[in-house]
Image: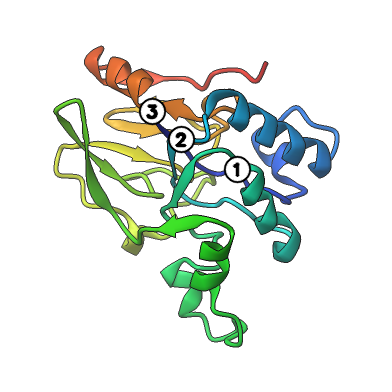
Amino acid sequence: MRWFTADLHFGHTNICLYAGRPYENVDEMNEDLIRRWNHKVAPVDEVYVLGDIAMGKIDQTLNLVTELHGKKVLVPGNHDRCWRGNLKKKHRDTSTNWMERYEDVGLNIIEGSFEFDLAGVKVLVDHFPYRGDSRDEERFVECRPVDAGLWLLHGHVHEKWRVMDKMINVGVDAWGGYPVSELELIELIGHKPQNCVPLSWS
């Protein structure tokens, strides 16, 4: 089975407030996200994480990835230290090879947009949506994929939507804290929805 998710934000203290996650503290959130992931994902499964996997004290939070089942592929997002936009920032610590650091915890990294086949339906995969943001203003416009009419699997917008036009937000805040399976996505695309609100955390 193949799964998709995004925006776990391990170690991000304020994400519960920003995105409405039902946790009292960041440790509770980290533990429950791992539990929800492992409840769905088998060790032999493959999971595509569309960005923003860990924040906070990165030496601690990035190591949480080793507790997650499955073969994990990361498409870096703007909060990932290995994202090309962050690697170019002059204030970043150049003594750390961030690509290697992320790979050391079991993440295979694919940079930028790529096409993916879902049961004969060609979709585009990226951290960023074609348009829209988790904030009021549009950020990282120069990093957005080009909208050529394909369905897009993405993260970045947290709880703003689950489906908007042909953009499917696979982030945990849109799917009740769980990864979404390839089968669920195929079924969703088959219904050709224009808009879907996020599922509630339960």
Quick check: 140 left or right of 125? right
Q: Which mark is residue 1?
A: 3
Q: Which residue is mark 1?
A: 8
Q: Residue 147 location, x and y as percent?
A: 20, 45
Residue at 53% across, 56% down: 106
**Is 144 drawn above or below residue 133 in the view shown?**
below
For marks 2 and 1, give the CA distance. 21 Å
Question: In this rendering, which labeled residue sits more in front, label 2 or label 1?
Answer: 2
Amino acid type of the residue that numbered disc 3 sits on in the rendered structure: Met
Quick check: 194 left or right of 67? left
Question: In this rendering, which labeled residue sits more in front, label 2 or label 3?
Answer: 2
> Image quarter for residue 40?
top right
User: SS of the residue at dot 1?
Assistant: loop
User: SS of the residue at dot 2?
Assistant: loop
Label 2 environment density (alpha carbons within 10 Å; few <14, some 14–19, many ≥20) = few
Amino acid type of the residue that numbered disc 1 sits on in the rendered structure: Leu
For marks 2 and 3, give the CA distance. 8 Å
Amino acid type of the residue that numbered disc 2 sits on in the rendered structure: Val
Q: Are marks 2 and 1 in contact (CB under 8 Å)?
A: no
Tell which circle, 2 or 3, labels the residue nearer the N-terminal end.
3
Q: How is the image coloured?
A: rainbow
Q: Which mark is residue 44?
A: 2
Q: Residue 76 location, x and y as percent?
A: 45, 58
Residue at 32% across, 55% down: 144
Q: Residue 118 location, x and y as percent?
A: 23, 30
Tell which circle, 3 or 1, labels the residue nearer the N-terminal end.
3
Report the front residue among 87 and 17.
Answer: 87
Q: Residue 200 location, x and y as percent?
A: 61, 18
Tell which circle, 2 or 1, labels the residue nearer the N-terminal end.
1
Q: What is the residue that sits farthest to the right in this orientation?
A: 24
Q: Which mark is residue 16?
A: none
